[in-house]
Amino acid sequence: MILFKKKANVAEEPKEKIYDVDDFLKLAVNFYNTMGIDPYETGRKWSIWFQLYFAANLINMVYSFFAEAAYLANTLRDSENLLESCMVLSYWTFVIIGLSKICAVMYRKPKLTSLVKQLKSCFPSSAMDQEEYDVKSCLKRTHMYTKGFGVLYTVMYFAHTLIPIFVYFSEKLLLKYPDAKQNMPFYQWEPWEWRDNWWFYPTYFHQSHAGYTATCGSIAGDLMIFAVVLQVIMHYDRLAKVLRELKIQALNNPNAVDEDLKKLQSLIANHIDILRLTDFTNDVFGVSLLLNFVASSLLVCLVGFQLTIKFSLQYFGKQVLLLVSVLFEVYLLCSFSQKLMDASENVGIAAYDMDWQGADKRFKKMLIYISMRAQKPVCLKATIVLDLSMSTVTIFLGMTYKFFCAIRTMYQ
């Protein structure tokens, strides 16, 4: 009985789970897969139906892009319909954001594959190493941000696609309005008459699905950036921790100088690898970040203009959700870039805080080397045009306000 009880206790002991890079990227990859996109080479073979599904999604989204452009050109001819023109332009801008991010991941797929391989090569593989890197806490933080951001954008999408048809069926079936009006979720020109006939339902579906593709394209690109940046921050934090806790063996044993030098050389090499990883991350996502900021500034301006000109209960909730989603996206990107900057600077502070006074001269010179590298903080870069940080939010809001004033002046 005692032996049986011991075996039962051993069986009940939970095993420490080993995490990997795919656990961080899982949600972003799932959003890409729902569009028929494999963002990087995973070794998984996709069927021809998966590729056809992506082609159908892309064609539908590109068609909606030009259909909205045609509708926008028609509304701009009417100077008295500026409010509707702004609404169409805001939807069109959102489609541009999603389409640009989809094109970016397709064009940058080889580089994104290389980035993921680099992340996997430096990712801690054993339970002891993962405890040192605090992988579990980092993954929990990643899921908190990515799931929260994904839920916000998903709610915003369903609000735009479900409210019009819900209002229509409520007026027709519940309130029995004889003149219940059919409306599409978005404004775009269609070459067929869809009102008051069966074409309403396939047209509504194709517009909703185009909106879904644009939304997923925008969500997935940002989630990928969040997951990658948080991993890089994890590596910087671990390096700073090891530097602070590094014990100089030569203080107690003069013959251990070479051992101290080898440890520091290993940490310097690790620091160089992390810096290269950061540069490669900016190379992959730089163009996407720049387009995102320019388009988001215009989108916030247009939505804000609509909210200040006319109040409509049907559109107010949708527009507020769109405004909050875009502002939250910009805030998170700038916040993560600021965290990355702080984590890189912390490496230099950790090098100074360690007990280096009694170390060998060669050790001190090498420590100066890592400190000098850390003095130039790294951050997310929207190409060479813009370095992201919390101060960038001020620049973003200032640029948005200028757009807003220009449109407001035109309206008056």
Image (cartoon, rainbow, N blue to C red):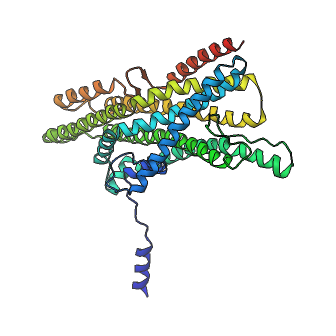
Q: Quadrant of residue 80?
A: top right
Residue 161 is situated, as x and y percent measured from the top left of the image, at 65, 44
Work out which residue is located at the far front of the displayed protein and give it: 192
Q: Quadrant of residue 159?
A: top right
Q: Nearer the viewer, residue 324 or 126?
A: 324
Q: Nearer the viewer, residue 316 or 373?
A: 316
Whether residue 32 is visible? no
Whether residue 187 is visible? yes
Residue 184 is situated, as x and y percent measured from the top left of the image, at 68, 40
Residue 204 is situated, as x and y percent measured from the top left of the image, at 64, 45
Work out which residue is located at the far bottom of the displayed protein and give it: 1
Position of 10 with respect to 202 (left or right) is: left
Residue 359 is situated, as x and y percent measured from the top left of the image, at 21, 32
Q: Is residue 342 above or below residue 32?
A: above
Q: Nearer the viewer, residue 349 or 268?
A: 268
Q: Nearer the viewer, residue 349 or 141?
A: 141
Name the image quarter holding the N terminus: bottom left
Name the image quarter holding the C terminus: top right
Position of 384 with respect to 276 (left or right) is: right
Total number of numbered labels? 0
